[in-house]
Amino acid sequence: MAFRMFNILSPAKRAVSRALLLSALGFGVTATPILAPSVAMARPAPDSFADLADKLLPTVVNIATTQTLKAGPQVGLNLPEDSPLRDLFKDFLGPQSAPRHVTSLGSGFIIDPSGLVVTNNHVIEGAEEITVTLNDGTSLPAKLIGRDDKTDLALLKVNPKKPLPATRWDDSDKSRIGDWVVAIGNPFGLGSTVTAGIISARNRDIAAGPYDDFIQTDAPINRGNSGGPLFDMNGAVIGVNTAIFSPSGGSVGIGFSIPSDVARIVIDQLHKYGQVRRGWMGVRVQAVSQDLAEGMGLPNASGALVANISANGPAAKSGMHNGDLIVKFDGRAIPDSRALPRLVSETPVGKKVTIDFLRNGKPMSVQVTLGRLPEDNVSAAKKNAPQSPQHKVSKGSRLGMTVAQIDNAARAKYHLGKDVIGVVVTDVDPNGPAAEKNIRPGDVIVELQNQAVHTPDDVAKRVEADAKSGKKVEVVLLNRGGELAFVPLRLS
């Protein structure tokens, strides 16, 4: 009986066996290097973090703050004067008529031997007294140099008798997912505590502020760690520990740190000016969805779409328009709408930068001299719009909404300013495209497909023409409470 033989050797071993066989038979064989498959090699975990901890612990401080809460109402004492329960509630709740002193704890780290300390803004916000405790137990009163609520950072100053051990910043952009990191802080007020982990993710947006770009780590971080440093294996700061995701209140391995590349710029300005001076273009941008990209004929869903331009702002003076798609800022690519505000804010006021953008698919560029970001440049959106109109003029059946011309009655009913132009939405079909995109009564349609509309007939004619031409998506420029945004509506 014949047996079928299967060669179970690896390709490399088969090559060696063949070479040996040919050599044994007297054939000349030229040696050929055998290349092993490329394998990603992970750096091994350190045998110990002890040497690194010894070096870093003196640079990390504990921060205690005190503030006075005003007297509150007499909770539980809304009883008749002769009720025996009044004394019971007084004994249990204490004298609530007196102000209360509240203490909170956090962390920080020294960045200069003269006594400059970095922490989170939320650690010291509202504090009347701030005390910094060094690793050797020395307590020093601290002065607030400056704070920034947009990035949740603050800079303190203590006056030590001798130079303090200080740490240094490192380039957080060089840090990679999977790199080892060490967090040091004051969790739950226990005192200096060292934990280790890896970088779990980059560029996290947790809706904490307008410039979110967090490093995510699984190094255990708990309450009290706020303001403490996240170190790399070189002993340099790559992040400021700021937030955790935790259903229970304790660490579940999801912590967030402000990257050092963001923190360093903010802290430098707080040190120099006592406040942050951010660059300003005078544009409001929005993300580009697949529907918007299709409706506007864009090559892909990337870049930052200009939804509104501030009058007399830097972008307006340069000739930019609503609907321009910004793809580069000062030579740096803009992958999405989140990237542009961060880059602009980090750029010095007064610097002239090149903006590359697409207008109706055509590449263009302009020079923009950045101004300074006004602190009150965010307008409040209107909250409660009426649900039923005084009059209905045109039913936009393909868009799933009713629109009306803006007259004096409409301006009064929907609280529209004199400078608001377009047509006002008066009713929305709950099962139509407009409802799907959260359009509601009181919203104003300014443009359709980059064409201004002034009457309901303008809307009807534009939509019907686009539908007949084969368009699947109608791009609406919407004004809600003074804020403009492009909204893609699929034609039904």
Image (cartoon, rainbow, N blue to C red):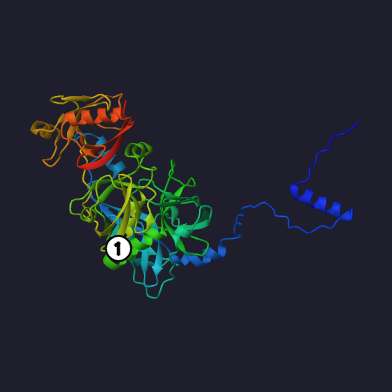
Q: Decide if residue 425 is on the left or right side of residue 17.
A: left
Say which of 40 and 19 sits in front: 19
Residue 21 % position (x, y): 86, 51
In the rendered image, the vertical position of residue 31 relative to residue 74, given as above or below: below
The residue that appears at 10% across and 33% down in the rendered structure is: 407
Q: How many numbered markers are drawn?
A: 1
Of the 4 image quadrants, the one containing the N terminus is: top right
Q: Residue furthest front?
A: 469
Q: What crowding class fits label 1: few (fewer than 14 Cα within 10 Å), some (14-19), or many (20 or more)?
A: some
The residue to which callout 1 is attached is 348
Q: Decide if residue 132 is on the left or right side of residue 80.
A: right
Q: What amino acid type is highlighted by mark number 1?
A: Pro
Q: Residue furthest bottom?
A: 162
The residue that appears at 75% across and 46% down in the rendered structure is: 10
The residue that appears at 49% across and 47% down in the rendered structure is: 253
- The quarter holding residue 388 reads top left
